[in-house]
Image (cartoon, helix red, strand yellow):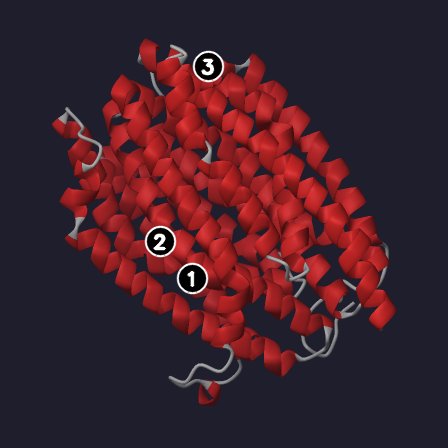
Amino acid sequence: MKSKTNSKDLTDGPVLKRILALSVPIIGAMFMQTATNVVDIVWIGKLGSDAVAGVGTSTIFLQLVWAFASIFLVSSGVLVSQAIGENKNKKAKEYSRDSVKALMLIIILMGIILQVYFDEIIGFFNFKKQVVIDSAYVYLSWMSIFLIFSLGTLLLTQISNSRGDAKKPFLYFSIGVVINLVLDPIFIFTFGWGVAGAAWATGIAQFIAFALFLRKSFRTFFGGLTQWGFRFIRINELIKVGLPTSLERIIFTGVGIAITKIISDWGSDAIAAQKIGNQLEAITFMCISGLSSAMLSFTGQNYGAKKFDRIKKGYFYAMIISLLLGVVTGLLFYHFDEELMGVFVSERNTILIGADYLEVLGVAQVSMCVEMVTTGIINGLGRTKYPAVINTSMTVIRVPLAFFLANNMGMGVDGVWYAIGISVFLRALFLTVAYFYLTNKLLKSEVTVS
């Protein structure tokens, strides 16, 4: 059903049907985004484990920019969906315009920092091989320029999902993936550009996807050009909602940097193994992120419309989907660990280290799925502090736990993998408790007040 706001109404109709109709295209779009990264690593892996280690390390700092940008990526999704649920389209467009302006400022500032302070950033890891440093420099230099397209597309996707339309993002991500698939081998090997070729292939694909998406949705999402200006109208609300999640992701990225530093003691093979493992897990991560994003929009609209029973039903169905996905991917990672690693690299040591990592990730997949979907639902209620506090605290413990297990307990790099798995389980546990607390207390009190 379409409302006069050109948005899909998620507050009426069968709950499971609405969730699937919204989440399947989002999952498809997220999968396409992941496919781009996986294909990049497959081609880069043909250049050797050292190239993978360099590119993988540089992506940590690209994720740091994404973490800062999450202030507006998350808050735009929450507040636009709630405004649509209240049938206030003008307000939704104000949130969207302010999010774009603020996002551009963050991208420009962080891009300059990455370009200027590269030596200090990569020097932190004390890499012994120059090829690792060179690969990191080339990839980070180019991708920091292309951030405006990748993060811009993510913002458009969040706004589109919040309006109940997940088909457009899927279409444009698909176009980008196809372009990237074609350009990767040409730029990397035919032109001989190596790591720079992978960056350019990705950047061009992201630019085309962003330009097509923006052209199609500009007026619907943001209004006419006359409504734009330098003044921020809703910035305080956006920051209030998005800051907790952004801080969580900033800290999470900081933990990732610390973990990479610990892993670097076992050489570039261990770092390459971790980065390949992360790319494989990203298949689950992005799929469940799609469901989480759908549940944020579904919860936000129904919360705005004060239809709390639909939120509880949505949680039930989302958990069933999450458990199924977690079990399937977990079994895949656990039983086909060496085969999956061998797709990316040929070095035996990297494959063996990565296989151990995949086994731990396989066991942790169900917990990760539960954690992420629950986070999306709680964020859709506008209570972003709960997931932020839980996810942050349970992620920070990775560093001392990894150091303790790897060094004090003599487990080596496997201790790092176990620390990651334990922290994921704890996040899922405490977020589940937080969800039931909110539904039993917060939503009940809202019904009483209304």
Left or right of residue 347: residue 389 = right
- Tag 2 near tag 3, CB within 8 Å: no
| Horizontal and vertical percent position of residue 206 | 39, 54
The amino acid marked with disc number 3 is Asp
Q: Residue at x 53, y 24 (%)?
A: 361
In the image, residue 298 sits, relative to residue 261, either above or below, namely below
In the image, residue 310 sits, relative to residue 37, either above or below, namely below
Quadrant location of the N terminus in the rendered image:
bottom right
Q: Which residue is mark 3?
A: 356
Q: Which residue is mark 1?
A: 152
Q: Mark 1 or 2, which is nearer the eye?
A: 2
Q: Which residue is mark 2?
A: 65
Question: In the rendered structure, which disc, 2 or 3, sits on the residue that comes first in sequence?
Answer: 2
Neighbourhood count class around disc 3 (C-alpha, 10 Å): few under 14, some 14–19, many 20 upward? many
Neighbourhood count class around disc 2 (C-alpha, 10 Å): few under 14, some 14–19, many 20 upward? many
- Tag 1 near tag 3, CB within 8 Å: no
Tell me how far mark 1 sits from mark 2, CA to CA. 12 Å
Find numbered disc 2 in the image and state the secondary structure of the residue it sits on. helix
Left or right of residue 146: residue 450 = right
Left or right of residue 65: residue 437 = right
Question: In the rendered structure, which disc, 1 or 3, sits on the residue that comes first in sequence?
Answer: 1
Neighbourhood count class around disc 1 (C-alpha, 10 Å): few under 14, some 14–19, many 20 upward? many
The amino acid marked with disc number 2 is Val
In the image, residue 64 sits, relative to residue 238, either above or below, namely above
